[in-house]
Amino acid sequence: MKAYLYDDLPGDQRLPHDSGKTVDADDLTKLGVLYYRFSDVDGVNKLASERGYKNRDEITVSPEKMGAVYEEKVKSFFHEHLHEDEEIRYIRDGYGYFDVRNKGDQWVRIHLEKDDLLILPAGIYHRFTTDETNYIQAMRLFKEEPKWTPLNRSEELDANQYRKEYVTSYLQ
Ligand code: KMT
Ligand code: NI
């Protein structure tokens, strides 16, 4: 895992966009973003059961797997959104970027690799993209009633109960 402030310069979303300003795991924790590394799935199973997760699936995001819809899919993952539930991703292979908004509403870019696990809290604005390797395989974990439909950022959404709880807990 490597995290830094996004440079906000034009260019493909899959380029690093590294401003050179590092963000560490403690800074992420202050935003409610938790980072772990698990070399095998046993640790993931334990964490999942502690947090009440029962379901999971695996997704491969790559042109080989997705064919013609790959570019479209990658663009859709990159729309800024939130969920009314936690989002847990365990990277099984390849690389990807999760971008999250910090206190000053700047993007923090988190580069994940195999064995990294990231927990994004409910209500945080974020987006995802593959990197230049165009390949990631990830486990997505769900609670029983998944409330993680992506809700795109808007002014009305700032009044959402889960958004307000996130702001109160982490941004004030
Ligand atoms: C997400 O949350 O945007 C995704 O599920 C993308 C694929 S998982 C790396
Ligand atoms: Ni999401």
Image (cartoon, rainbow, N blue to C red):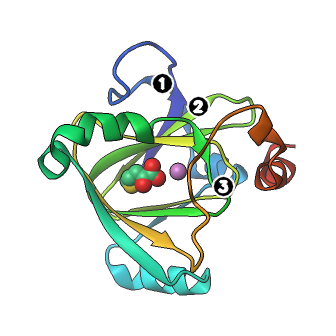
Tally the marks: 3
Q: Which residue is mark 3?
A: 29
- Quick one: SS at disc 3? helix
- Name the residue type under label 1: Gly
- Asked whether 20 or 84 is in front, the reply is 84
- Image disc number at residue 107: 2
- Name the residue type under label 2: Trp
Where residue 91 appears, as percent x and y from the top left, is: 34, 61
> What distance separates the C-alpha of mark 2 from that of mark 1?
13 Å
- Quick one: SS at disc 2? strand
- Image disc number at residue 1: none
Q: Are marks 3 and 2 in contact (CB under 8 Å)?
A: no
Label 2 Cα crowd, 10 Å radius (few <14 / some 14-19 / many 20+): many
> What distance separates the C-alpha of mark 3 from that of mark 2?
15 Å
Residue 87 higher or lower than 158, as above or below: below
> What distance separates the C-alpha of mark 1 from that of mark 3?
20 Å
Where residue 153 appears, as percent x and y from the top left, is: 65, 36
Q: Earlier in the sequence, mark 1 or mark 3?
A: 1
- Name the residue type under label 3: Thr
Residue at 44 percent across and 84 percent down: it is: 45
Q: Nearer the viewer, mark 1 or mark 3?
A: 3
